[in-house]
Image (cartoon, rainbow, N blue to C red):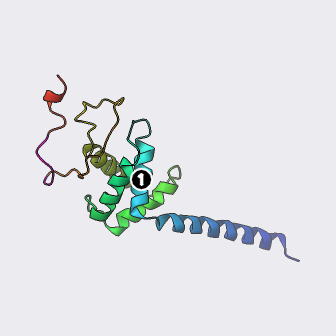
Amino acid sequence: MTSRRRFIKLSVASILAVGVGYVGIKTFATFKNVIIDILHADLEGLNIKQGEIEKFALQASQSNPWGFNEKKKKLLALYRSSRNIPLPFKEEYKMYRDEIVSRFLLSTDFFLNKMDERKEIKYTGVIWGPYTTPCINPFSSLFYE
């Protein structure tokens, strides 16, 4: 027969073990899945063509246009599953998340369509980069006259 103290200690230890295991599993998610989850969550209200996010995520996870190291990738994967829990490095997480979303939107025809949210957004097939894509200024006044 176990005492009450031993029971409470075992219960707390098992809850902690389950929590650590869950976080461990989430941090081993592929970078592609992390990108997909971030884009689906942040761009929920936009009319994005089916499969465009997956195409971008596959290409971006292979080329890593942001230059994220493994530490940054693990941070993104960790926060993906625990958004409401106040963990350290939350501001860095938000910054990395914004970089992913902005790179995706610049790689689509969203700005070329004058940021019309009703039009279907399509991925152009090329990840936007200042040195890798043709000269275009999506914020030019020529698009908004």
Residue 87 visible within the image: no
- Residue 142, above or below 4: above
**Residue 44 magenta-drawn?**
no
Q: Which amino acid, by three-letter code, is at mark 1?
A: Ile
Q: Which quadrant is the C terminus positioned in?
A: top left
Residue 36 image position (x, y, % from top left): 41, 53
Counting the numbered discs, the total is 1
* Residue beneath the point at 42% across and 50% down: 38
- Magenta segment, principal secondary structure? loop
- Residue 114, above or below 91: above
Kind of element beneath mark 1: helix
Is 142 on the left or on the right of 19, as rendered?
A: left
Residue 129 image position (x, y, % from top left): 19, 52
Out of 5 and 82, give the one closest to the viewer: 82
- Residue 140, above or below 89: above
Question: Looking at the image, which residue sits at the far right?
Answer: 1
* Residue beneath the point at 43% across and 64% down: 30
Question: Looking at the image, which residue sits at the far left?
Answer: 135
Residue 112 visible within the image: yes
Q: Which quadrant is the N terminus positioned in?
A: bottom right
Please tell me in which quadrant of the rendered image residue 77 appears: bottom left
Residue 27 image position (x, y, % from top left): 47, 65
Residue 55 image position (x, y, % from top left): 34, 53
Q: Name the residue under label 1.
A: 36
Out of 137 and 94, give the one closest to the viewer: 137
> Around disc 1, counting alpha carbons within 10 Å, would you say few (fewer than 14), some (14 to 19), or many (20 or more)?
some
Out of 74 and 33, give the one closest to the viewer: 33
Is 81 on the left or on the right of 92, as rendered?
A: right
Task: Specify the segment rendered in magenta.
Answer: 131-136
